[in-house]
Structures are given as C-alpha cells and as structure tokens.
Image: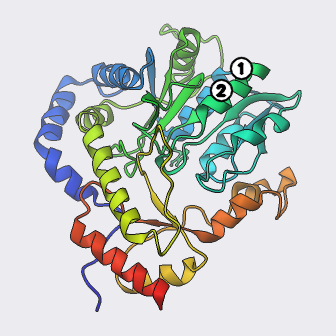
Amino acid sequence: MKGPEIPMLDLKRTFKEIREEVMDAFREVLESGRYILGPKVESLEKEVARYCGVRYGIGVASGTDALHLSLHAAGVGPGDEVITTPFTFFATVEAILYRGAIPRFIDIEPDTMNLNPDLVEEAVSEKTKAILPVHLFGLPADMPKIMEVAKRYNLAVIEDAAQAFGASIQSRRVGSFGLTGCFSFYPSKNLGGCGDGGMVVTDDPATAEKLRSLRNHCTDGRYLHHCIGYNSRLGELQAAFLLVKLKRIDEYNRARRQKALFYTEQLKEYVRCPVERTGFYHVYHQYTIRTPLRDKLRETLKKEGIASVVYYPLPMHLQDAVRWLGYKEGDFPEAEKASGEVLSLPVYPELTEEQQLRVCEVIKRAVDG
Ligand SMILES: Cc1ncc(COP(=O)(O)O)c(C=O)c1O
C-alpha cells in the first residue's frame, strides 16, 4: 500500500527550525539599506574561509561562477586543456568552455565514481593548464594523489566542491587543497541558500585579489577598469541566510552521514551502496546506490510515492552540447556504466527512521521480486 510521500529533501522543515534567527537577520539587512557585498557577505567570506582552513573567501553569484572565475583567475584561456571527470553536473564543463578552453576527460574510479587519479598523468599534454576534480555526491576526490601530479607538471587545481561543503580528507577540508575551492549555495546543497549563490576559497593572496576584482567588473571603485570582469556579486540577504545555516553545518552533515550509514546497513545485500574511504569524510550530498535494476527500482519507488533521481543519466562526453569535442560511446566505460546504474535516494537531516525504513522495505521487495 502506498504510504506518505517521501521527497528528495524538505527545505520547509529545515526553515522551521531557523525561522526566528533568519527573520531577525533579514530585518537587520533590510533596515541597513546595504543589499549587495556588505558586512554580511564579508562575515560569510571570513567564516567560510576559516572553516575551510584558508585565508580568503570570495562570495560570487553561483557555484558555476565560482568555477568560471577561478579558471579565469588561474590564467586558463582559449585553447588550454583542463583535465576533468565526465561524470559530473554539466556546470563543471560549461565553466571550462566559457573560457574557450577544452575539457580533457578521463574516466572515473568504479568504486567512488570520482575522477581516477591514476589516469591524470597520461592525460597531461603541452596544452594542459589545470585539473578540475569534482567531489561528487559529497565524497572528496583523491586530492593527495591529484596534487602530487599537479605539482610535478605545474598545473593549477580548481576543486569543484559544489556538492561537498564540510567534506574532508584526514581532517583537511575540501576546497583547501587546490589553488581554489568552489562552492555552490544552490538551495539543495549541504549548505544551501534561499536562492543562488556561491563562493571561492583560496589561500593565495594574488588569486583572491584577482577574484574580488573579476566578480565586480574589475573596477577599482572609481570607475576605472583594468580588465574585463563580470557581474557576479553575492547579496546580503543571501549571506545573512547562509550565516545562520553555516553555524549548523556540522550538525546537518552529521545527520546526513547517520542517515547514509543506516541505508548502507539496511541495503548492502541488495544494491551497491556508496563507499566509505578511510580518512575521507563523506558528507552525503547524495546517497547514490547502484544496481543494474535501476529503472525498475525507480518505477517501483515512484509508485510508492518515494522520490529518487538519476544523477546523472548521460556522462558529459556524450552530451549533445559538446559533440564537437569528438568523444564517442565507449571512451569512458566506467562513467558510462555508472550512468546506467545510479539512483540517488532521499537523504537530508530531517528524514526520519520510519521514512528510511519504508524506502528500504520498498527497495528490498523490488530487488527480491
Ligand atoms: C558538481 C557541481 N558543479 C557545479 C555546480 C553549479 O553550481 P550552481 O548551480 O550554484 O551554479 C553544481 C550544482 O548545481 C554541481 O553539482
């Protein structure tokens, strides 16, 4: 029998818990008359940087802009190659293409579904300027190995940490390994805003300065412009909302982990569950299982009122938009296999054990039947 609906996430419940604090902060901003790049954005930049263990945070308009502006600041331009994963959200690739640069895909590790660090070196060419690893679904990519190759070939590393706020490797936070770390505050993210937003973190003062300039038309404040920049500013209301949630991010991530480990305990005999790597702190932006029965399972969940999503149904190298890059089916077998098998289940701090048990019961029945 169909039970109550179980959504992918429940932002209304998250908001209920922080309502008073958010309303007070909003009132303060609205009454201040300062709505863009003001004291709230500055506080958020400082706190996010401190949280990540680096010196600088630069608020921007989205995670996509965080990547785009980072590549610009790193000197990536037309004709340069950027090594990245084909199994990600399209924005990773768009950011490279906005610069007129070429994404050079390499396959993923079958267990983590992150960029395979052992394939980076053979992809390096004379045109390679940067590596853009993605911490997919909240699990850090293998940064120690990636940084080692990057140093050897003098390549910039831009971390796409859009899905991994708070994730770490041996207690070192993602975003702090590369030249820059890029976060998205899209509402569904682990640190989600009430609209679009993003941030770049970096420990490099020159890069920080370049990013601050780029996000605001490269102005020096006196209408003199030394380069061509962008309008990619973060608003004060957004920053005020995010400051309230930032205080609770560890609690949110702990809750996500607890739900994830519960799923794994229940489902490990039935489907392929996400891997936990020693020393890698996975923050489960998504809880993504794998099964060859994916489509059937998805249908069954849908009939039972349980949401699930396929992130991502087609790897980047096979997308119509980039057909001109010349990749073909079979180029990255692990990414292609993952696309056919993945299914993300509801995972968020407010999900109850009762809801999780129902999700598990439906999955077990579907797989057994
Ligand atoms: C891996 C990845 N990169 C980049 C982005 C882009 O972030 P935004 O939507 O804030 O532009 C997202 C999320 O949407 C993402 O999941």
Q: Is residue 291 above or below residue 193?
A: below
Ligand 1 neighbours mark 2 (CB distance < 8 Å): no
Q: Secondary structure at mark 2?
A: helix
Query: Label 2 crowding class (10 Å Cα cut-off): few <14, some 14-19, many 20+?
Result: some
Tag 2: amino acid: Met
At which x and y percent is residue 67? 59, 34
* Cβ–Cβ under 8 Å for marks 1 and 2: yes
Q: Is residue 258 above or below residue 200?
A: below
Say which residue appears at 35% left-offset and 19% top-offset.
46
At which x and y percent is residue 256? 33, 52
Say which residue appears at 60% left-offset and 46% top-offset.
91
Tag 1: amino acid: Lys
User: 99 and 283: which one is in front?
Assistant: 283
User: 203 and 266: which one is in front?
Assistant: 266
Which residue has dot 1 on it? 151
Query: Label 1 crowding class (10 Å Cα cut-off): few <14, some 14-19, many 20+?
Result: few
Say which residue appears at 58% left-offset and 40% top-offset.
141
Quarter of the figure with the N terminus? bottom left
Which residue has dot 2 on it? 147
Image position of 90 (left or right of 32): right
